[in-house]
Image (tube, rainbow, N blue to C red):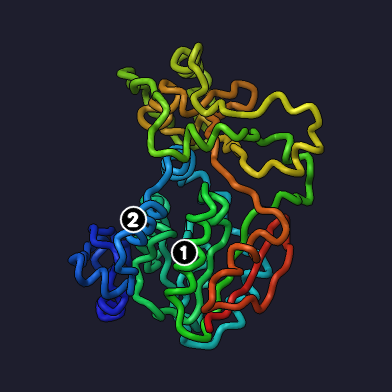
């Protein structure tokens, strides 16, 4: 296994965490110097293009706060809800030749890792807590960014990106993530990409999401961060993660309420003045989608207490949850195809709509 990962060789000059089978060394680190990285990337040499490359890789604040931090906070509960395999993804994985190396970019809790027992899977995700969950299940995984995958060119036989690109907040970053998926597979290799669609089968879901207006670009995508309240100095007692402790949860409600009352919602950059909701949904693509973390699953002594105190999360007494907002850019029909259109070394071999997702399969030329 060490020999396999020595062939992967990270393209990132910074150190990364590699989580592996618990029976081997759980965490290892690797690094490349700048010359090795430039060689592995085959990156452009001009100063202007290099600056553009760095700009695309620089993570916007909206992703840091409303994707990375949220999934770190909800990882155990999120993982407990993610077990069903989509038939289309399962069919794609089952169609691969025995011995194929499959790269899962944005693997989450690893529900697709090892799905085809005849293939070798390597997963990566931006969330260390989710990678910990994968490693605990014996998967080969590492912490990495979708726009800067830590694999050499032409390494894998196939790659998948399931429900990941819609968390990237600019066209340039979404396109870069697609280019990375193509880069890391061999010639003739296949890439499956799925993203949430604006055209949801259950249209009522859109009314439960918070639409973001144009000003989110200037407030969040720009490098400067919006003001955030200082974290609370109050340390609340942890809530046990078993359903038997509902009574204990109730007793702590007052503590939670005190920590959340009167706080401004720093995520409130929504468009509330739309006069025609149906017409608005046709053009709206940027949303905050809530995740309800039950009180008895929340780490009230740590992340959730701080999130409530600084306005990063809100309390929903009716549902008994701490509510986190996740950033989504939902795709319109044809948008994935337009992102791929200018990429010369790949062609679309399949495209379809499935379970409120737009999906494409690419072949590397």
Residue marked by disc 2: 51
* Horizontal arrangement in the rendering, residue 203 relative to residue 327 (left or right): right
At 74% from the left edge and 28% from the top edge, which residue is drawn? 274
**Mark 1 burial class by Cα count in 10 Å: few <14, some 14-19, many 20+:** many
> How many badges with numbers are in the image?
2
Dot in front, 1 or 2: 2
Residue marked by disc 1: 105
- In this picture, is 69 found above or below 1? above
Front residue (pair 230, 275):
275
- In this picture, is 331 found above or below 32? above
Quadrant in which residue 145 is drawn: bottom left
At 34% from the left edge and 58% from the top edge, which residue is drawn? 48
Counting from the top left corner in percent of width and height, residue 114 is at 49, 72
Counting from the top left corner in percent of width and height, residue 153 is at 38, 77
Quadrant placement of the N terminus: bottom left
Quadrant in which residue 357 is drawn: bottom right
- Sequence-wise, the earlier of marks 1 and 2 is 2
């Amino acid at each position: 296994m060490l020999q396999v990962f020595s062939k992967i060789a990270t393209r990132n000059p910074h150190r990364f965490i590699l989580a592996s089978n618990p029976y081997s060394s759980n965490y290892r680190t690797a690094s490349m110097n700048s010359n090795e990285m430039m060689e592995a990337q085959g990156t452009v040499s001009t100063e202007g293009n290099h600056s553009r490359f760095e700009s695309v890789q620089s993570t916007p604040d909206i992703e840091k706060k409303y994707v990375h931090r949220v999934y770190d906070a909800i990882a155990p509960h999120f993982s407990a809800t993610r077990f069903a395999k989509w038939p289309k993804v399962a069919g794609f994985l089952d169609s691969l030749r025995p011995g194929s190396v499959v790269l899962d970019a944005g693997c989450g809790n690893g529900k697709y890792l090892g799905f085809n027992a005849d293939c070798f899977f390597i997963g990566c995700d931006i969330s260390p807590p989710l990678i910990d969950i994968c490693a605990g299940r014996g998967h080969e995984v590492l912490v990495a960014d979708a726009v800067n995958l830590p694999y050499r060119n032409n390494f894998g036989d196939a790659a998948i990106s399931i429900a990941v690109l819609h968390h990237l907040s600019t066209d340039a970053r979404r396109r870069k993530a697609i280019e990375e998926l193509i880069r890391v597979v061999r010639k003739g290799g296949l890439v499956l990409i799925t993203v949430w669609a604006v055209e949801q089968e259950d249209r009522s879901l859109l009314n439960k999401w918070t639409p973001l207006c144009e000003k989110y670009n200037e407030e969040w995508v720009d490098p400067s961060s919006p003001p955030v309240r200082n974290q609370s100095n109050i340390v609340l007692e942890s809530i046990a993660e078993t359903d038997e402790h509902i009574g204990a949860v109730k007793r702590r409600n007052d503590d939670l309420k005190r920590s959340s009352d009167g706080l401004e919602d720093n995520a409130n950059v929504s468009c509330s003045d739309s006069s025609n909701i149906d017409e608005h949904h046709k053009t709206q693509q940027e949303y905050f989608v809530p995740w309800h973390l039950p009180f008895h699953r929340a780490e009230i002594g740590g992340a959730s207490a701080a999130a409530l105190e600084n306005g990063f999360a809100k309390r929903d007494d009716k549902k008994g949850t701490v509510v986190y907002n996740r950033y989504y850019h939902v795709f319109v029909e044809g948008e994935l195809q337009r992102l791929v259109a200018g990429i010369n070394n790949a062609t679309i071999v399949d495209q379809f709509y499935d379970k409120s997702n737009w999906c494409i399969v690419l072949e590397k030329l």
